[in-house]
Image: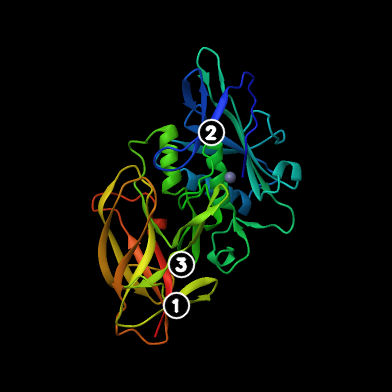
Amino acid sequence: MRATPLLAALIITALSTSPALAYRYQVCSALGDSKDIKLPSASLTLRSSPVSFPAGVWLDGLNNAISQFNKNPSPFRFSRVTDSGGVGRGNGQSEVWGSTDNSVLQGAPAIAYTYYDCYWFFGIHSNINEGDTVFDYRSPWQWTPTTTKSAISRYTGSLRLLQGTAVHEFGHVTGLKHENRFYNVMGSDFTHLDTNGSTVNAYVGEDTGSGLVDLYGLNGSGIQDLAVAHWRYLGTSGEYSTHARTRIFNTGGTELSKSTVGAEPRYNVTRGTSVKAEFTFENLGRSTQTNAPVKFYISSNDIISTADTLILTSSVTLSRDTPSTTTRTVNIPSGLAAATNFWLGVIISTPAGVGDGNSANNTSYIRIRTN
Ligand SMILES: [Zn+2]
């Protein structure tokens, strides 16, 4: 969620703008000129409430969210200090806290308030002066800072990942708005995750990373990072994108039958046949990667590694623009045990000689059962 009080007098107009590619931000326009509405520099110190985020798991979770946000291809970086003197809206400090106040939360599980100028005085003034992030923390607590997959609501748990929503709200603080046309964290952040084994991670995503580059420029010596996920764009819910799990099809393009196991889809596959496996590939780094290796595996569990059974070596070329949800045709080995659960895994790597600054998001899987 987002709310945008204005502090400035002489307000002209603030327009929502969508560049040709994706992501949305606000623009201040006056007298035939315009400027992006953003923070005055590529860094901001967030002040966390010591009551809402005491030392321990909650503060660790908040720090994790900041760390994930900072793995973006622009120079923009958040830092954090513990607040003193009390938190509040419109006090000139960008703070993070929990609240049970409906007038602050406005019905949202979390909300960001940005305070910005948009006026002309011998030039356009369009700086964000303050960005506050507030979580609803009334009982029953709906958040978890743990990245254990079994605790998360889109898997077998019931709680929402604090870090994912924090990344979303921090995006608002930088000047980004909601986005409903692509798989992205400024849409449905609860279903914007990367996963391997028992762990899930929140992340900025390709679309939002590109938005940050638009607002704050490219970090020319910044991160290179490719990623793969088993989530994809589904549709819109108001300003938000909605996401669903990626699928497996037969070679004719018909989705295979599936059941739900451990809150995840499990596709029924026939040994010795070819199927089309769908995944979302993202370039979260500073430059285009050409012919990046993409390898598919059969695994006996949800931990995908190069020690699993390799079934296809392919490649993909990814510029940093919007996420790419595509299929690859793979053969389900005839020698697999029948009536057995497996995981169809995928690993994407940066090309040789190009480091990958975030190896946690290079693998994904879809559950399968052989027949
Ligand atoms: Zn929002």
Q: Left or right? Give the position of 36 relative to 7.
A: left
Q: Which residue is rendered at x = 57% and y = 47% of the image?
A: 166
Q: Earlier in the sequence, mark 1 or mark 2?
A: 2
**Three-letter amino acid code of the residue under disc 1:** Ser
Residue 44 marker: 2
Image height check: is 341 above or below 145? below
Please report whichever mark, 1 or 3, sits nearer to the chain's N-terminal start.
3
Rendered location of residue 334, percent (x, y): 29, 84
Numbered disc 1: secondary structure = loop
Q: Nearer the viewer, residue 235 or 353?
A: 235
Residue 180 vs 4, above or below: the answer is below
Q: Which mark is residue 197?
A: 3
Q: CA distance from mark 2 to mark 3?
A: 34 Å
> x%, y% of residue 326?
35, 60
Q: CA distance from mark 1 to mark 2?
A: 48 Å
- Amino acid tagged 2: Leu
Q: Nearer the viewer, residue 69 or 64?
A: 69
Q: Which one is in front in this view, the residue at disc 1 or the one at disc 2?
A: 1
Ligand 1 located in image quadrant: top right
Check disc 3: other Cα within 10 Å, few if <14, some if 14-19, many if 20+: some
In this rendering, the answer to whether 103 lies above or below 253 is above
Q: Which residue is mark 1?
A: 257
Q: Quadrant of residue 339?
A: bottom left
Which residue is pictured at 46% across the width and 62% down the height? 195
Residue 216's image quarter?
top left
Residue 51 visible to the viewer: no
In the depicted view, which residue is nearer to us: 180 or 336? 180
Query: Marks 2 and 1: in contact by CB < 8 Å?
Result: no
Of the numbered discs in the image, which one, if any, rests on residue 212?
none
Kindly report which numbered mark, 1 or 3, lies closer to the viewer in this rendering: 1
